[in-house]
Image: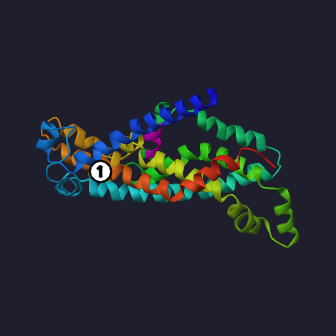
Amino acid sequence: MSKLFRNIGSHVFLILLSLLIIIPVIWVFVNSVKSSADILLKPLSFPEKITFDNYVNAWNEAGLGIGFINSVIVTLITVTLIVIISAMAAYVLSRKKFRFRIAVQNTFLMGLMLPTFLAMAPLFLLMNDLGLVNSLPGLILVYIAYSLSFTIFMLIAFFNQIPDSLEEAAIIDGCGPFKVFWMVMFPLAKPGLISAAIFNFVGIWNEYILALILITDDELKTLPVKLANIMMVQQYHTDWGALYAGLVLSFIPVTLFYLLFQRRLIEGSTAGAVKE
C-alpha cells in the first residue's frame, strides 16, 4: 500500500511539474497568434481570430529574420567544430599515455573554473587586437574556446568506455592512428558526440552576453540579442505580438533538434557512466 501511495505521489508530482513547464510554453504560442490589443486586454484568453502577422512583423520589421539566420550559421558551424576538435583531444587524453597528459587535462580543467564575466574585458581587447570584433568568425572562435573544456571532459568518459580490444584489433588489421580514430573510435562514440552536440547547441543558440559584447553591427547580431532589442523597444510602443512570435522562433530550433536526437541523448547520458 505504501508503495502504491509513493507511485501515485511521484506521478502527481511529475504531472504538476510537466504542467508547470508546458503551460507557459502554450501561453507563448497562443499569444504569438493574437493581436497586441488582445494580448493587453485579454492576456489569458484564447484568440478570437488567429493571425500570423506577428511572425511577419517579427521576421521583417523587428529584424529577427537576419538574427535567426546568423544564429543558425554560428551555432551549426560552432557545434560541428567543437565536436570534431573535442573528440580528437578527448581520444588522445583517454587512450594515449604520454608524459604531460595529466598536465594537459588540468589545463583544460582550469577552463571550467574561469567565470565568463571575469574574462570579458581582456577578451574584448584581445579580439579587437586580432581584428575579430564585430565578425561572426570571431564570435565562433570565442564560442569554441569557451566550450572545449566541458566537451572534452564529457567525451573522455565515452572513449574510456570503449573496449581496448576494438582499437587493438584495428591496429592489427593495419589501421594507422588516424584511421583508427575516424573509422573505429569516432563512430563508436556517436552517442556521446550527439549528447555533446545537443548540450552545446542549446547553450550557444541561447548565448547572449558574448554576442552582445563582440557584435555591434545590427546585420551581424544573433537572435538572442535581437530579442533583447525588441524588449528595449517595448518601452516606446506595444508590439507584444512580435515579441511572442520571436520567442516562438527562438525555441523551435532547439526543440526540433532535441526531438530528432532525444533517443541518442538518453543513450549518451548513460553510455559513459561505467567502463566495461
Specify the principal SS of the magenta part: helix
Query: Bounds of the magenta span?
Result: 122-127
What residue is shown at x 63% (from left), y 35% (from top)?
110
Q: Position of residue 94 (x, y in %)?
A: 76, 49
Quick one: 240 or 220, which is closer to the camera?
240
Q: Is residue 50 above or below residue 210?
A: below
The N terminus, quarter of image: top right
Q: Quadrant of residue 184?
A: bottom right
Q: Position of residue 166 (x, y in %)?
A: 82, 62
In this image, 123 relative to 248: left or right?
right
Q: Position of residue 4 (x, y in %)?
A: 59, 32
Is residue 267 rendered magenta in the image?
no
Query: At numbered mark 1, what does the secondary structure look like: helix, strand or loop?
Result: loop
Q: Quadrant of residue 87?
A: bottom right
Q: Is residue 20 above or below residue 134?
A: above
What residue is shown at x 34% (from left), y 43% (from top)?
25
Label 1 packing within 10 angstroms: few (<14), some (14-19), many (20+): few
Which residue appears farthest toward the right when viewing the image? Answer: 172
What residue is shown at x 83% (from left), y 45% (from top)?
99
Q: Which residue is mark 1?
A: 217
Quick one: 91 or 201, which is closer to the camera?
201
Q: Position of residue 121 (x, y in %)?
A: 44, 34
Name the image colouring: rainbow
Tell me the kind of residue under disc 1: Asp
In this image, 254 relative to 66: left or right?
right
Quick one: 40 or 157, which is closer to the camera?
40
Quick one: 129 or 235, which is closer to the camera?
235
Q: Is residue 3 visible?
A: yes
